[in-house]
Image: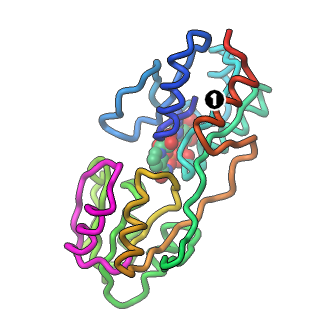
Amino acid sequence: MLGGTTEASALARALAAHPGYDVLLSLAGRTEKPSPQPVPTRIGGFGGADGLAAFLRQGQFDLLVDATHPFAARMSQNATEAVAKTGIPAFCLRRAPWIAQQGDNWRHVASIQDAVAALGRSHRRVFLAIGRQEAYRAETAQQHFYLIRSVDPVDPQIVLTNARYILDRGPFDVESETALLQEHRIDAVITKNSGGAATYAKIAAARALGIEVIMVSRAAAPAMPAVETVEAALATINHLLPPG
Ligand SMILES: NC(=O)c1ccc[n+]([C@@H]2O[C@H](COP(=O)([O-])OP(=O)(O)OC[C@H]3O[C@@H](n4cnc5c(N)ncnc54)[C@H](OP(=O)(O)O)[C@@H]3O)[C@@H](O)[C@H]2O)c1
């Protein structure tokens, strides 16, 4: 299983309880202290689609589950190619995107770069809630204040004249997200449309405070069968691969 998400860990937990399955969970190694996992793990890239295909053959795996984050596009593309090369059954576990509700003030953009550009020329106070990997994109718009939240420190450091960095790991609740937006007088939130409950509170808080959300859309879904919930993933595994 390709992981790095809450859903991957939950699915791993459910499978660990089944003596009929041997599960290996693969993590990219992006977080300095990954949460403890209920199954054996391996960490680090495979060396592209060919590397993953070779890894799958060598390990004689019967099934590949792509349970990576909806924005881990490269990994999902590699998984699709590796599956085509090896013929190993596979499916993708991808949580549903968030959908705007009444009261939401969202602007949809295709990338973080576009999100930063969409802030406009005049000074804004921005909550950049996109993780650390692409926070450097804010460097192109120095006229704004940025509140940058990530699990680990942004590294390499980025050069922003007006920024505040906070380290925190979800899940977050609406009360504390509302207080955070108010404390920093935020008037725009930049987020990826990750979906799921763990980081939704900032969206609800922005709605309550009437703050604009610049929502980065997902790239096209990977070309393999997909389910949206851990329960559906378990049912698919049971169907494709009854416990040995
Ligand atoms: N992007 C996000 O917003 C986000 C948020 C939360 C968690 N995550 C998790 O963090 C991981 C990395 O995300 P990303 O955006 O950097 O992905 P990415 O850009 O799609 O992946 C870049 C490269 O990292 C390696 N990689 C990615 N996921 C891996 C995994 N689960 N196991 C082994 N190698 C992996 C692969 O290297 P090789 O080509 O060498 O195999 C891949 O080509 C993912 O597992 C994802 O679930 C991402």
Q: Residues within 10 Å of mark 1 (few under 14, many from 20)?
A: some
Q: Secondary structure at mark 1?
A: helix
User: Which residue appears at 53% of the width and 77% of the height?
Assistant: 102
* Rendered position, 71 above or below 211: above
Where in the figure is residue 15, as x and y percent of width and height? 55, 21
Where in the figure is residue 67, as x and y percent of width and height? 58, 38
User: Which residue appears at 47% of the width and 74% of the height?
Assistant: 214
Residue 21 as seen in the image, left or right of residue 128: right
Where in the figure is residue 127, as x and y percent of width and height? 33, 70
- Residue 164 falls within the magenta-colored stretch: yes
Q: Which residues are magenta?
A: 162-188
- Residue 116 falls within the magenta-colored stretch: no
The residue under label 1 is 234
Residue 174 as seen in the image, left or right of residue 223: left
Quadrant in the picture for the C terminus: top right
User: Which residue appears at 24% of the width and 67% of the height?
Assistant: 180
The kind of residue on which mark 1 rests is: Leu
Quadrant in the picture for the N terminus: top right
User: Which residue appears at 30% of the width and 79% of the height?
Assistant: 125
Where in the figure is residue 151, as x and y percent of width and height? 31, 48
The image quarter in which residue 188 lies: bottom left
* Rendered position, 220 above or below 65: below
Residue 4 as seen in the image, left or right of residue 89: left
